[in-house]
Image (cartoon, helix red, strand yellow):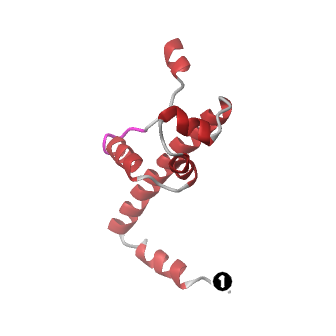
Amino acid sequence: MLDTSYHDRYAAKRLEDPEFRAEYERQRRVIGAIDAIVDRLDALRVERGYTKADLARAIGKNPASVRRLLTAKGNPELATVVAIADALESEVVVVRKSARRRA
């Protein structure tokens, strides 16, 4: 017999509602897009050999705020960007400037 938590049963019940499921899926896309952007930015940071503190200095921000951006889930400002892109049936993509110049 499968033992599920109250939360799992509650979520499964709510996901039966088409309106709730649509909003749930939309939020999953927003969170996924934000995570992808942050992950790509962090990978670019590593590729260039910057520490998080180096990056913070380069953009004039507190190192703690950069660490939070690169490790915490979600960011309201990025969520707004992703929501706009989602509304336009688009994706937010981070492209290296050198790659843009070649294209």
Q: Could you tell whether 94 is left or right of 23 in the image?
A: right
Prevailing secondary structure class for the magenta stretch in the rendered image = loop
Q: Count numbered badges in the picture.
A: 1
Q: Quadrant of residue 15?
A: bottom left
- x and y percentages locating residue 45 in the rendered image: 61, 35
- x and y percentages locating residue 21 in the rendered image: 40, 65
Q: Is residue 77 highlighted in magenta? A: no
Q: Is residue 29 above or below residue 8?
A: above
Say which residue appears at 48% left-offset and 75% top-offset. Answer: 12
Q: Is residue 90 highlighted in magenta? A: yes
Question: Is 72 in front, or is 22?
Answer: 72
Residue identified by numbered label 1: 2
Question: Is 43 in front, or is 60?
Answer: 60
Say which residue appears at 48% left-offset and 46% top-offset. Answer: 33
- x and y percentages locating residue 73 in the rendered image: 52, 56
Q: Could you tell whether 98 is left or right of 89 in the image?
A: right
Q: Could you tell whether 53 is left or right of 25 in the image?
A: right
Say which residue appears at 55% left-offset and 19% top-offset. Answer: 99
Q: Residues within 10 Å of mark 1 (few under 14, many from 20)?
A: few
Q: Is residue 103 above or below residue 6?
A: above
In the image, farthest residue toward the top: 102
* Secondary element type, mark 1: loop
Give the magenta-colored segment's residue range.
87-91
